[in-house]
């Protein structure tokens, strides 16, 4: 069986989840790619000099040619790079798009710098929000975040629509992929 037939079979019979993740150096590409994305079958990658909207446009435009050949719903999971958000919306406006939970958590940790207790509490409640199995559980953890974090929680949560990080509110299927690392 040729590689083309294998890729076609995999694409036709599997859920399509596209983790878009910038790799920093050659070692990431060669040595750690499969460690960062266990159980994901890679069909393409691009090598560019810098992560910007022009390069994301080039990559996603080529990806769209491949994925739009046989129209299926695609789930994108990204790191919230501004240029990438615009490009995904342009080329895949009706497909699902979520954010890596680990990047959101790291952003929240940076906003809590200097206050370990607050950081630990907010990150725990945020994780509970992301993985909540009911709207009530999600709302309860959001309220806990807002009650102890006030300004930090408000600015963090208001900047990220819940549909991009919460299992219960996600408008597609994340197929069990919340991040690029083992949860």
Image: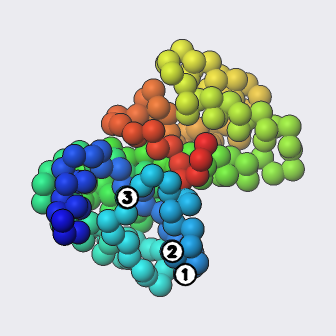
Q: CA distance from mark 2 to mark 1?
A: 5 Å
Along the line of sight, the residue nearer the viewer: 137 or 37: 37
The percent position of residue 32, horizontal first and vertical second, equals 57, 68
Q: Nearer the viewer, mark 3 or mark 1?
A: 3
Of all residues, the one furthest to the front in this rendering is 1
Residue annotated with mark 3: 41
Q: Secondary structure at mark 2?
A: helix
Using the rendered view, name the quadrant where residue 40 is placed: bottom left
Residue annotated with mark 2: 29
Depicted 20 relative to depicted 17: above or below: below
Q: Are marks 2 and 1 in contact (CB under 8 Å)?
A: yes
Residue 26's label in the rendered image is: 1
How many discs appear? 3
Judge left or right: residue 1 versus residue 26.
Answer: left
The percent position of residue 89, horizontal first and vertical second, equals 30, 54
Q: CA distance from mark 2 to mark 3?
A: 14 Å
């Amino acid at each position: 069986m040729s590689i083309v037939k294998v890729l076609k079979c995999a694409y036709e019979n599997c859920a399509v989840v596209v983790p878009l993740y910038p790799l920093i150096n050659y070692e990431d590409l060669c040595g750690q790619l499969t460690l960062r994305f266990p159980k994901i079958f890679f069909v393409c990658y691009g090598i560019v000099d810098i992560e910007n909207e022009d390069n994301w446009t080039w990559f996603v435009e080529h990806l769209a040619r491949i994925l739009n050949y046989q129209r299926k719903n695609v789930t994108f999971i990204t790191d919230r790079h501004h240029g990438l958000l615009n490009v995904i919306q342009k080329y895949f406006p009706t497909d699902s798009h979520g954010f890596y939970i680990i990047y959101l958590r790291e952003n929240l940790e940076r906003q809590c710098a200097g206050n370990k207790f607050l950081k630990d509490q907010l990150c725990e409640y945020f994780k509970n929000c992301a993985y909540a199995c009911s709207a009530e559980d999600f709302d309860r953890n959001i309220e806990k975040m807002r009650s102890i974090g006030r300004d930090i929680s408000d600015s963090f949560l208001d900047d990220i629509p819940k549909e991009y990080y919460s299992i219960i509110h996600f408008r597609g299927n994340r197929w069990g992929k919340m991040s690029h690392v083992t949860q």
